[in-house]
Image: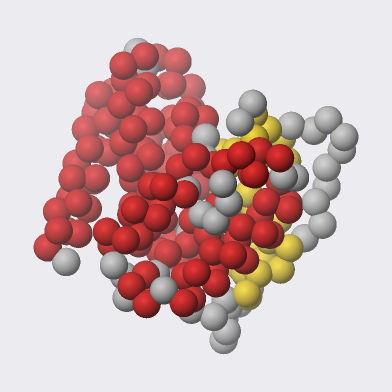
Amino acid sequence: MKKSFCHALFLVTAFFCATAVAVAAEMAPDALVKETSQDVLEIVKKDRDIQAGNKQKIYALVDAKVLPHFDFKRMTQLAVGKSWRQATPAQQDELVKEFRTLLVRTYSTSLSAYKKQTIDYKPLRMEPGDTDVTVRTVVNQPGGQPIPIDYGLQKTADGWKVYDVVVDNISLVTNYRGSFSNEIRKSGIDGLIKVLVDKNRAAEQAGAKG
């Protein structure tokens, strides 16, 4: 995974941390992005524990505020690709659970990387009745190149949900799809589940030692 992709993932977390689900359901996707990301960046900037990388505090924040605004089932389905239909309902549930854990840990780790970045918001291209849109932003880094971050959102009964993030032209879903496909070809669906379980267990043990 490219360094800029990893470094910018904190914005994914920042996206939705500060707004209640009921409010988010009523907001337009671009308004949701702008209002909540600005609120959260202020929180992160002022929170010394998060800046210092307090994992438990970051995990609690992500678990409470981020998960309601992501469609992890669709993200997993898109990442697994055509093999998703081969999985049993129980396997699908396991894939969603482990992929969600992997992503949340990635977001949590990158959240503490925020320093003095600012965000520009591009005009939303959206027609009346659209239920699938892309919200485009650019992250400006002091002393570095701007990083474009695009968010794919779909309107659901519970409001707008993120199902993909494209950082510097690299799709999160596509980024994982290649490695997932390779693992499924080698070891099947259960093999992919085992790989995800092992990665999450290793990350948890490393976090406990840290």
Q: Residue at x 66, y 38 (%)?
A: 25
Q: Residue at x 27, y 30 (%)?
A: 193
Q: Is 187 in front, or is 154?
A: 154
Q: Residue at x 57, y 84 (%)?
A: 142
Q: How many marks?
A: 0
Residue 90 position in % (x across, y down): 31, 16
Residue 134 position in % (x across, y down): 71, 46
In the picture, measured across the screen, residue 192 lies left or right of residue 208, that is right
Residue 50 position in % (x across, y down): 37, 70
Q: Residue at x 33, y 54 (%)?
A: 59
Position above or below: 64 against 208: above
Residue at the far right in the pictured view: 128
Q: Is 197 in front, or is 175?
A: 197
Residue 138 position in % (x across, y down): 67, 66
Q: Quadrant of the C terminus?
A: bottom left
Asked whether the viewer can see residue 175, the reply is no
Position above or below: 70 against 40: above
Q: Quadrant of the N terminus?
A: bottom left
In the picture, measured across the screen, residue 29 lies left or right of residue 5, that is right
In the picture, measured across the screen, residue 140 lies left or right of residue 201, that is right
Residue at the far bottom in the pictured view: 143
Which of the colour schemes (rainbow, by chain, secondary structure, one colour) is used? Answer: secondary structure
Q: Is 19 in front, or is 69?
A: 19
Asked whether the viewer can see residue 70, the reply is yes
Position above or below: 142 against 150: below
